[in-house]
Amino acid sequence: MATLVGLPPLLVLTLVIVLPALESSTLLGLVVPGETAILIGGLVAHGGALPLWAVVAGGAAGACLGDQVGYALGRRYGPGVLAHAPRVLRRRVNLARARHLVARRGAWAVVTGRWVAVLRTVVPLIAGAGGMRWSLFLRANLLGGLAWATAVATLGYLGAASYRYLERELGIGEWALLVLIGVVVALRVWRRARRRSADR
């Protein structure tokens, strides 16, 4: 954690903006989820090198900008953009199911899809390809992006506070953090395995 907090604030803020922006616009979210940068931003904000509001604003701006680019690509190239999607995308998400979700839920699919890494990557493309109105997508995108960036940055900030408290008061901070990371990794592996078996 000391290493993360010691990163140059400008570098952290750049990552907070750039990684979420690249999630949907370049499909980078399939490899590196944008929340990673925002969580680190929250940690750094707790250390005092960055204000928390800057992390939230940067993360929300990057997320919304990237999704607008994804929407524009879907609008410009239509369903063909997903027909030629990389194999890794087709393995990780059921595109027919994602299309159905956007068609059925509309703007709410944009807002709620923001909270699932794989959906966050493809929903803007699907919304654009499916002909969702630009103004409707923009409103949903702004709402989802701001709520998501606020929650993730705050989680990073509070996670750092909890870690420091445990380390100082209880002397078990490192163990608690390792257990937390272990639980998160185990849950992600379990969810991926479950999703793969459901897709077969």
Image: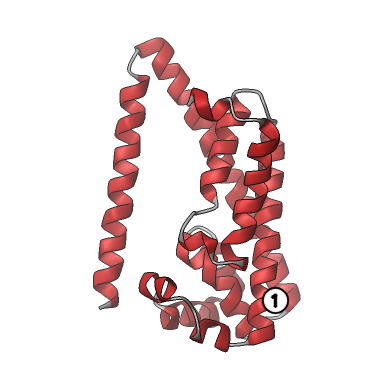
90 sits left or right of 150 in the view: left
Q: In which quarter of the image is residue 50?
A: top right
156 sits left or right of 61 in the view: left
Residue at 39% x, 77% y: name it. Answer: 94
145 sits left or right of 196 in the view: right
Find residue 56 and report its horizontal and vertical position in percent: 66, 43
Find residue 173 and report its horizontal and vertical position in percent: 37, 21
Tell me, what colour scheme is on the image? secondary structure
Q: Quadrant of the C terminus?
A: bottom left
Find residue 138 and report its horizontal and vertical position in percent: 72, 68
Tally of numbered tags: 1
Q: Where does label 1 land, which residue?
A: 72
Residue at 65% x, 30% y: name it. Answer: 8
Q: In this view, does 183 lie above or below 66?
A: above
Find residue 110 and report its horizontal and vertical position in percent: 58, 68
Q: Residues within 10 Å of mark 1 (few under 14, many from 20)?
A: some
Residue 131 visible within the image: no
Going by the numbered disc 1, the residue's amino acid type is Ala
Residue at 32% x, 31% y: name it. Answer: 178
Q: In this view, does 86 lie above or below 189?
A: below
Q: Quadrant of residue 105?
A: bottom right
